[in-house]
Image: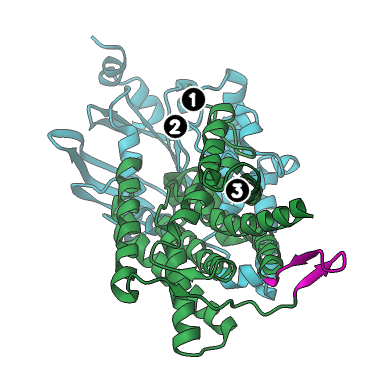
Amino acid sequence: MGFLDNLINGISLGSIYAVIALGYTLVYGIAKMLNFAHGDVIMVGGYVIFTMMTTLHVNPYLSILISMAACTLLGITIEKIAYKPLRQATSLSVLITAIGVSYFLQNMALLIFGEKPVTFTSVINLPKITLFDGQIIIKSETTAAIIVSVLIVVGLSLFVNKTRSGRAMLAVSEDKDAAQLMGINVNRTISLTFAIGSGLAAVAGALLCSTYPVLSNTTGAMPGIKAFVAAVFGGIGSIPGAMIGGLLIGIIEILGRAYISPQLADAIVFAVLIIVLMVKPTGILGKKVSEKV
Amino acid sequence: MALLEVKKLGISFGGLRAVDDFSISINKGELYGLIGPNGAGKTTIFNLLTGVYKPTDGSITLDGVNLTGRSTIEINKAGIARTFQNIRLFSNLSVLDNVKAALTNRYTYSTVTGIFRLPKYFSAEKAMNEEAMKLLSVFELDGEADTIAANLPYGKQRKLEIARALATSPKLLLLDEPAAGMNPNETAELMNTIRQVRDDFDMTVLLIEHDMSLVSGICERLSVLNFGQLLCEGKTAEVLSNPEVITAYLGE
């Protein structure tokens, strides 16, 4: 049953990657920028929950809501201060700024919470699922991660495709200037995109820290980068692509760790990215980009 | 009183004076043409009128409201909508969603209402669908509401762009080379469409065009632009027979 256990762990980790990848893909799809600070917003979300629960003894679910509100606000603020002034700049400038924001958040957390990692108490309080007379145990964190990621993918697709704000987001992603001239407020739409992406980061933070209960100022960095790989793998800009990419990267990482080499697991994930970029540069569900002459 | 009143409009890009001392006055319900050789500054004037560029000098007044220096969104809300020289639809969205995207400002409900699908979501979306379909049927595009915009034939994409612009409920419609790339049959059909828009929507139209059959066929008055300055203006037939205009187009 070892393989099934590993597969379940892979799906669990993959679901978390999927939620993070959704944030990447949403912001990239609409604002056309890679927000490398996304992973660190997850870390901030984790610390907010930790502070609420452990220091202030707030109810776990209320802590998640507070963390979502805090991250949403943080996302909007980052966009306004760091990215908005660069709306007309080259994508390279924006990318470097995003890396700067990432280091800023990491070091602020270091300053406030110190370098010693803290132990996170799981926010999830569901029963375990036991199968085959106890041979397979599905942890409540796994169940929660899977349910939450599916709900978010479905909800986000419905929101983007079927609502007024979602349509404005799609219009902005297609042609910012034309959208503006049709009366769509581009700045507000991009702000909303960051708000939703960062709110999702808080959820991802809750899931990540509950599953792997050690929290430090660099907690978000590696999962952030791997989720970015997942978003590219699935086809960056595509919501279902982020889900598929996230699950596959999670499964590949866990199986690689179990059957190939624990030390090489991360290398395998990045090797997958390189192969995908060579074979299908747009990812599994990515749209074919055709240059019109 | 004129619907659009532009006085002594000018813009400089660094040392280049792209438009200088440009004035125009368009009456409500008029079909007005803006013509001139390539590079004369016609599209720059459209960009000034829609707020994409901010004028260095002069003023723009629509229906008595001063729009000089306002943002594109404010100007669109005040009632100026446009199409583009090279079609700029939201090409991966459906025909219906292209029009609905342009209705964003007119049927509002909050993001929260949208996420939780509160009753207002359904009533607003229904109203949007009805208005969008009504607009599409005017352009005989209602049968293709679910088609992805990029898959429409060229002539229909042009029509969809006009429908999308009208969805913002403008007082003045700016058409930037609507007949570009069209064959004579499509151009003739387009002329009917533009007239129909004027009559059905009680619209005022300012258009840039190089196709003289379209210009002489539907425009009531013309302004001719050359090197960023107004060369002459007046009734279409008079302007087109003006020797100065002929020289500007064909050279000495």
Q: Amino acid at mark 3?
A: Arg
Q: Quadrant of residue B189?
A: top right
Chain B on-screen colour: cyan
Residue depicted at x 43% and y 51%: A180
Q: Is residue B29 magenta?
A: no
**Which chain letter matches label 3?**
A
Residue extending farthest to the left is B15
Q: Amino acid at mark 2?
A: Gln
Q: Confirm whether circles 2 and 1 share one chain.
A: yes
Foreground residue among A291 and A13? A13
Q: In the image, residue B155 lies at what x, y percent?
A: 61, 29
Q: Amino acid at mark 1?
A: Ala
Q: Quadrant of residue B77?
A: bottom left
Please, what secondary structure does the residue beneath circle 2 have?
A: loop
Please, what secondary structure does the residue beneath circle 3 have?
A: helix
Q: Give the label, 2 or 3, closer to the camera.
A: 3
**Which chain letter matches label 1?**
B
Q: Are marks 2 and 1 in contact (CB under 8 Å)?
A: yes
Q: Give the label, 1 or 3, closer to the camera.
A: 3
- Residue identifier under label 1: B180
- Residue identifier under label 3: A257
What segment is highlighted magenta in the picture?
Answer: A128-140
Residue extending farthest to the right is A133
Residue depicted at x 53% and y 36%: A271
State whether residue A136 is above or below residue B69: below
Q: In the image, residue A17 lies at what x, y percent?
A: 58, 55
Foreground residue among B241 and B199? B199
Question: Which disc is residue B85 wearing?
Answer: 2
Foreground residue among B197 and B110? B110
